Amino acid sequence: MICPHSVTATTLAVVLPSAFAASVIKVQPDDAFGPNGVCNKPYPTFDLSKSRQPLVEPPRIRPDENGTTKVQLSLNLAHYMGPSYTTIMRTYNEMAPGPTIHVQPGGTMELELINCLHEPLGFKEHNSFSAPNTTNIHTHGPHISGMPPGDDIFVNLGPNSSMHFEYK
């Protein structure tokens, strides 16, 4: 499972084989933030205010014929309308929960994480969230070093930025 380190976590399942090494390939802005990019779409609305709505299964991302799983995850906001309250929530690729990611044993996962959230970064007061609109990728299950550039929990992906990861 990959978990974002943010104020409101959404679930994102990932199926990884046990022996994996990770590396951060590059950090670069791309067209995700341009006029037609994934970060410039209006926020979706999840209307779950009525009872007995069908369960929506998240899409599955599978490896290609070469054993490489290519994933682009965009972290953004959505409007949630529930039976007893309405709020803003965080989503991956305009879905909650995010997609299920499958990785082939011996294969590679290339992941681009796009943080579409905006400033402010947080508050200066004691006992407050210090950087609520930052995020990170953290894996559970594969044998990946916690030292950089592996499964580094201290990577801080700020608002309006993206980062590429490669897990082998």
Image (cartoon, grey):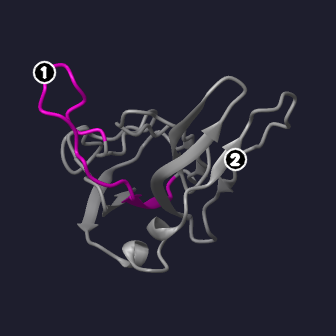
Q: Which residues are magenta?
A: 106-132
Looking at the image, can residue 108 be seen? no
User: Which residue sits at x=68%, y=31%?
Assistant: 82
Residue nearest the viewer, comparing 91 with 17: 91
* Residue 119 drawn above or below residue 17: below
Give the quarter of the figure containing the C terminus: bottom left
Looking at the image, can residue 96 be seen? yes
On the image, the x and y values in percent for residue 129 come to 25, 29
Task: Please give the residue where the numbered disc 2 appears in the rendered image.
Answer: 58
Amino acid of disc 2: Pro
Residue 126 disc label: 1
Q: Is residue 123 magenta?
A: yes
What is the C-alpha distance between the residues marked 2 and 1?
38 Å
| Category of crowding for the residue at label 2, using alpha-carbon neighbours closer than 10 angstroms: few (below 14), some (14–19), many (at least 20) | some
Q: Quadrant of residue 55?
A: top right
* Residue 30 drawn above or below residue 21: below
Q: Main secondary structure of the magenta part?
A: loop
Residue nearest the viewer, comparing 51 with 2: 51
On the image, the x and y values in percent for residue 79 come to 58, 45
Taking the image as shown, residue 97 lies to the left or right of residue 150, namely right
On the image, the x and y values in percent for residue 57 come to 75, 43
Q: Quadrant of residue 111?
A: bottom left
| Category of crowding for the residue at label 1, using alpha-carbon neighbours closer than 10 angstroms: few (below 14), some (14–19), many (at least 20) | few
Q: In terms of secondary structure, where does tag 2 sit? A: loop
Taking the image as shown, residue 33 lies to the left or right of residue 10, namely left
* Residue 37 drawn above or below residue 127: below
Dot 2 or dot 1: first in sequence order is 2
Q: Is residue 51 magenta?
A: no
